[in-house]
Image: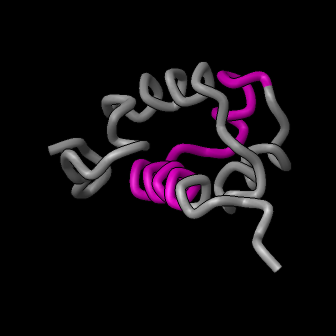
């Protein structure tokens, strides 16, 4: 049986989680800036829900990385900073 969620959703979620942890951003900060629950962030981070483009734009601003970071392999983040 095919998974309901695609590989890209999982990858994007893992990138969000990695940035959150390496930059030591608290969940409550994300919930306030995104206007969503901690549960929803967990769903994004695990790939259970797709991240809407507007939320990616907000994540991009919070973590100071280009939106392309979430959808491509154009660079890397080292020690929580875009290189």
Colouring used for the render: one colour
Classify residue 19 as left or right of residue 64.
right
Quadrant showing the C terminus: top left
Quarter of the view holding residue 29? top right
Residue located at (74% from left, 32% from top): 31
Classify residue 51 as left or right of residue 69.
right
Quadrant showing the N terminus: bottom right
| Residue 4 image point, x, y percent | 79, 62
Q: How many numbered marks have been drawn onto this rendered protein structure? A: 0
| Residue 5 image point, x, y percent | 72, 60
| Residue 11 image point, x, y percent | 51, 59
Q: Is residue 37 above or below residue 10?
A: above
Residue placed farthest to the front in the image? Answer: 1
Q: Is residue 45 above or below residue 71?
A: below
Residue located at (53% from left, 44% from top): 25
Is 58 covered by the magenta stretch? no
Instruction: Report the magenta residues as a range.
Output: 11-35
Quarter of the view holding residue 7? bottom right
Is 18 covered by the magenta stretch? yes
Residue placed farthest to the left in the image? Answer: 83
Q: Is residue 73 above or below residue 54?
A: below
- Please tell me which residue lies in front, 77 or 79: 77
Task: Name the main secondary structure of what is drawn in magenta.
Answer: helix
Residue located at (33% from left, 46% from top): 72
């Amino acid at each position: 049986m095919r998974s309901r969620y695609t590989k890209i959703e999982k990858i994007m979620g893992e990138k969000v989680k990695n940035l959150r942890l390496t930059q030591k951003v608290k969940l409550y900060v994300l919930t306030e800036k995104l206007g969503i629950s901690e549960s929803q962030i967990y769903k994004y981070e695990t790939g259970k829900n797709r991240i809407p483009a507007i939320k990616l734009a907000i994540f991009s601003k919070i973590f100071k990385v280009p939106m392309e970071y979430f959808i491509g392999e154009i660079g890397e983040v080292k020690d929580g900073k875009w290189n």
